[in-house]
Image (spheres, rainbow, N blue to C red):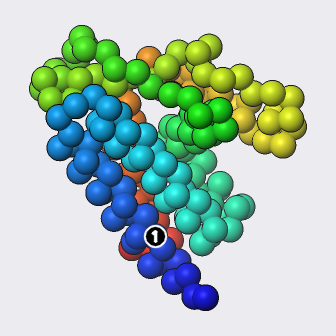
């Protein structure tokens, strides 16, 4: 059964991300808002996977890591991986505004922050052996995400992936 071209799969993942962001934007309650934000993270992972499969691992990692936002993408990948394997939350809601950008969204979204790294599930030895890059990505998480505003980093990651996808001819 034909699953579609790389471009069609890319477009589907991008549409699904936008739809999840729309649900986040429209949600009036915490539970659906949290679920939609987690779904946005999942679709970012799908976009990243589509791009990696389209380019091949070596080209993808080269393009990602040479991007100014490569460390951010690695940090988000690390966080998603911790959540997916252990079915745990990787962000929390904080009601206090912390900067001018976030202030105007607080009344509508609240401020979602990435968990402190020591509250994420630890990598076990098998994880570290199978994914040696995760140790470096953990450092990226601590430096770039820990305690920071989730929607800012998700938006930047999405824009970066779309830019890399466009350069790769995916849309």
Between residues 9 and 142, which one lies in front from this camera angle?
Answer: 9
Q: Answer with the quarter of the image where residue 128 lies.
A: top right
Q: Residue furthest top?
A: 96
Can you give x and y, in whole percent of width and height, for residue 30 in the image? 27, 28
The residue closer to the viewer here, 144 or 44, is: 44
Q: State the residue at coordinates (53%, 15%).
A: 116
Residue corresponding to mark 1: 10
Q: Quadrant of the N terminus?
A: bottom right
Residue 151 location, x and y as percent?
33, 35
In the displayed structure, would residue 21 be above or below residue 74? below
Q: Look at 64% across and 56% down and name the residue there.
A: 62
Identify the secondary structure beneath mark 1. Answer: helix
Residue 45, image x, y percentages: 53, 51
Is 97 on the left or on the right of 162, as rendered?
A: left
Q: Residue at 45%, 44% (x, y): give it.
A: 41
Q: Left or right? Give the position of 64 relative to 18.
A: right
Answer yes or no: is residue 107 visible: yes
Q: How many marks?
A: 1
Residue drawn at point x = 49 percent, y = 48 percent: 42
Tell which residue pokes out farthest to the bottom in this image.
1
Q: Is residue 57 above or below residue 120?
A: below
Quarter location, residue 11: bottom left
Left or right: where 50 falls relative to 29: right
Q: Quadrant of the image for the C terminus?
A: bottom left
Q: How packed is label 1: few (under 14 Cα within 10 Å), some, or many (20 or more)?
A: many
Image side of residue 71 versus residue 96, left or right: right
Q: Is residue 166 visible?
A: no
Image coords of residue 106 (percent x, y): 18, 23
């Amino acid at each position: 059964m034909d699953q579609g071209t790389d471009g069609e799969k890319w477009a589907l993942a991008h549409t699904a991300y936008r739809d999840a962001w729309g649900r986040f934007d429209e949600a009036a309650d915490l539970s659906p808002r949290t679920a939609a934000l987690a779904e946005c993270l999942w679709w970012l992972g799908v976009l990243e996977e589509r791009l990696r499969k389209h380019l091949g691992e070596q080209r993808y990692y080269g393009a990602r890591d040479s991007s100014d936002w490569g460390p951010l993408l690695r940090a988000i990948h690390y966080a998603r991986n911790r959540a997916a394997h252990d079915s745990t939350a990787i962000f929390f809601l904080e009601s206090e505004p912390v900067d001018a950008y976030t202030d105007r969204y607080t009344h509508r979204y609240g401020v979602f922050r990435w968990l402190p790294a020591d509250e994420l599930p630890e990598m076990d030895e098998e994880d570290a052996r199978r994914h040696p890059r995760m140790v470096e990505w953990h450092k990226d998480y601590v430096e770039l995400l820990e305690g920071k505003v989730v929607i800012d980093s998700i938006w930047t990651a999405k824009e970066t992936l779309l830019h890399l996808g466009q350069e790769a001819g995916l849309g």
